Image (tube, rainbow, N blue to C red):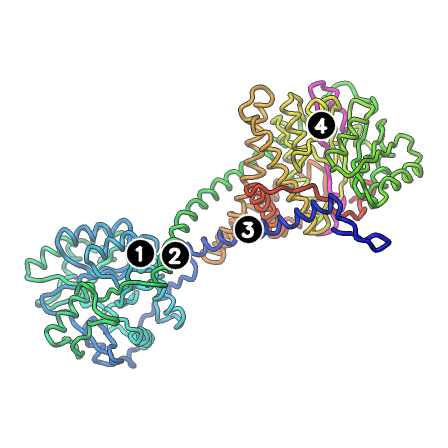
Amino acid sequence: MTTTSSRGRRRAPSRIGRAAGKAAALQKPRVILALLLLLALTSVMLLDGYLRAEVGGDQRVRTGASSSDVPDDILDGGPILTFRGGQATTVSVPDKTIALTFDDGPNPTWTPQVLKILEEYDVPGTFFVVGSMVSRYPGIVKDMVEQGNEVGIHTFTHVDLSYQSEARVTREMTQTQLALAGAAGITTTLFRAPYSSETDAIDNYSWPVYQELGEDGYTSVFVDTDSDDWKRPGVSKIIKWATPEDGEGASVLFHDAGGERSQTIAALPKYIEKMKAAGYTFTTISGAMAEQTAAGNTGGNGVPGAGAGVGGAAASPLQAAHREATGVTLYEGKALIAAVTLAEWTVPALSVGLMVVGVAVMGRFGMMLVLARRHHRKRNRRRFSWGPTVTRPVSVIVPAYNEKECIANTLASLAKSTHPIEILVVDDGSTDGTSRIAREAADRLGMTNVRVLRQENAGKPAALNHGVRSARHDIVVMMDGDTVFEPDAVHQLVQPFADPKVGAVAGNAKVGNRDTVIGAWQHIEYVMGFNLDRRMYDLLRCMPTIPGAIGAFRRDAVLEVGGMSEDTLAEDTDITIAMHRAGWQVVYQEHAKAWTEAPGSLKQLWSQRYRWSYGTMQALWKHRKSLTDKGPSGRFGRVGMPLVVLFQIVTPVFAPLIDVFTLYSMIFIDFRAALLAWLAVLCVQLVCAAYAFRLDREKYRYLLMMPLQQLAYRQMMYLVLIHSCVTALTGGRLRWQKLKRTGEVGTPAGVS
């Protein structure tokens, strides 16, 4: 940011200010993109659920209602109901004529078989299609129309319209028309209501729906003869029940979807052969209406010409109800088909991802419990020893940038160290008097082993490298400027160096400011997610990260791998992997405890975790060649790298699927079952957390915050990681960011 001097002149922004401004400008679009990805995922799931009648589904079917408001000539009329000129009229199918109708399709298994039979026997059919099925299987509908069959609307989600609002009725019809436009380039004026049968079943609730649709130009189609094939009564009964009496014409109902239809497929050719042998001809609904018009009557108290439709005649009289879709309707229809196609591919893929994530999550819990127990028993048995006790002095490096609130507490904790140390406070260009406060604190505490080194602001890795180069001892301990050590922390931390194969040691970092909600959430995460993980990685000999708050290194080993790199934001992960690749062992020392000040606000927490996750990705990418290396480097690449990628990137990125699917199931499918599943997973996590707290001798009362942590905190961590992935994929860069400190973490004794 631009500053103003005491004389009122404006000064150019500092290097840090310019970098921070650029970073802020770049991150906003990526945050929006991450949120848009989450919104897209939710939209795809809702669309898929709507297509399957899980979202907005209504299984109610009205029965036994009065028909007192329905005209008698309609109840006693033919199966085709029109409202031409505003007058309700019915049309019957001519004698010796069959209008084959099929409901509930298209279905990818049964509808193509029906179409094949109709084509073989040169028989047209009228298919009343469900819009959601049309949008999922548009190719079948296109073949259906091109073959010369007629289509009508059977609503979009197969609901009983008599229960629905006027807006829902309009939506059901419009969406189905769009699906037909996108699939076959047509719209239609034919309609058959789900759960309808003969006209005498029209009641006082459904009659207004038919009237409204009639005013919109729709022809409602009922049945004369129902094969009842959905009951699967057997081929012979299906044929018998579908046969009209005494040579009468009929609108005959079959089903090409909605269940197992092998009996329908078996009965249909035999039925066609039987009716042809009896002198019957087959037509569509529009064909039947055209025949009645040509004969000059409707056969059902109607008027001639009722089948002319609205908007002009189609090319074929058998498809007179079809209208060519043009303009906005056509493009909206194609967009609907494209969206549904995307959902049809995406949701199954997400389901597979959900299974993989579920297995990975449960596998991780299992591995952590088993390996953490082995680690604890191995390191805490009486005869365990790293080797001869390490008593020689070590150097403690404290990089500090504007740490005026914390640096005094940090030095006070080091003053109580039970191990001989020299302390190097590396002031990385602080502007708040950090170096002065450090010197005053050292003088006040009588610490003659403190050196304060100053440098121009160059970042944390440069400050650590300055400290390493200036260190007088062969072991260097690195800590953050906001961290306080327990008195024996340094002594415990350096004991593994008795083993000459050990090159670095990770300590046990704990949250000091845990008495707030955010602090308690992070405390649970540190104990369970970090320290329990480190026990597992230690046994597998692939520790990925030494925490910046407390870690120790052989000085020569650090210099050997090139020091702390500025290539990534996660310099601690970067140096740890480099140590592995150089052949050094990296171990975890649970008894070396340090207390760190965790972010106190959601904004600061987001900033820190964003840097961590993005930096981890950078470090993994930087060391990707370890996957093909030989020796220790290859071992980490083929063991540690996949575990880190799976458990720290892939699983967390896709873990929101568990919550999204759970929430979706609670709202739209089975609330009780989904809730029980979520509680079961929570119980598994509680068991793991409780065991981790037992190993670290922590108080269990903080686990009371875990359910809320799962509902709020975990979702934020998911978004942070997704944000980091978007940044990585878009080639973004991010600088190390300074968190605001309060200095509330004092001596370890003050932390409960």
Three-letter residue code for mark 1: Ala
Which quadrant of the figure has residue 283? bottom left
Three-letter residue code for mark 2: Ala
Q: Indicate which disc, 1 or 4, sits on the residue closer to the N terminus.
A: 1
Q: Residue tagged by mark 3?
A: 33
Q: Residue at x 43, y 47 (%)?
A: 346
Secondary structure of the residue carrying numbered label 1: helix
Three-letter residue code for mark 3: Leu
Instruction: Verify whether residue 509 appears in magenta.
Output: yes
Q: Residue tagged by mark 2?
A: 335
Q: Residue tagged by mark 4?
A: 563
Q: Residue tagged by mark 1?
A: 183
Kindly indicate whether the residue at mark 1 contacts the one at mark 3 (C-beta within 8 angstroms).
no
- Residue 624 in percent (x, y) is at 56, 29
Kindly indicate whether the residue at mark 4 contacts the one at mark 1 (C-beta within 8 angstroms).
no
Residue 193 can be seen in this image = yes
Image quarter where the C terminus lies is: top right
Which quadrant of the figure has residue 640? top right
Residue placed most toward the observer, 131 or 242: 131
Secondary structure of the residue carrying numbered label 4: loop
Q: Which residues are magenta?
A: 493-517
Q: Is residue 530 above or below residue 264?
A: above
Q: Residue at x 63, y 52 (%)?
A: 708
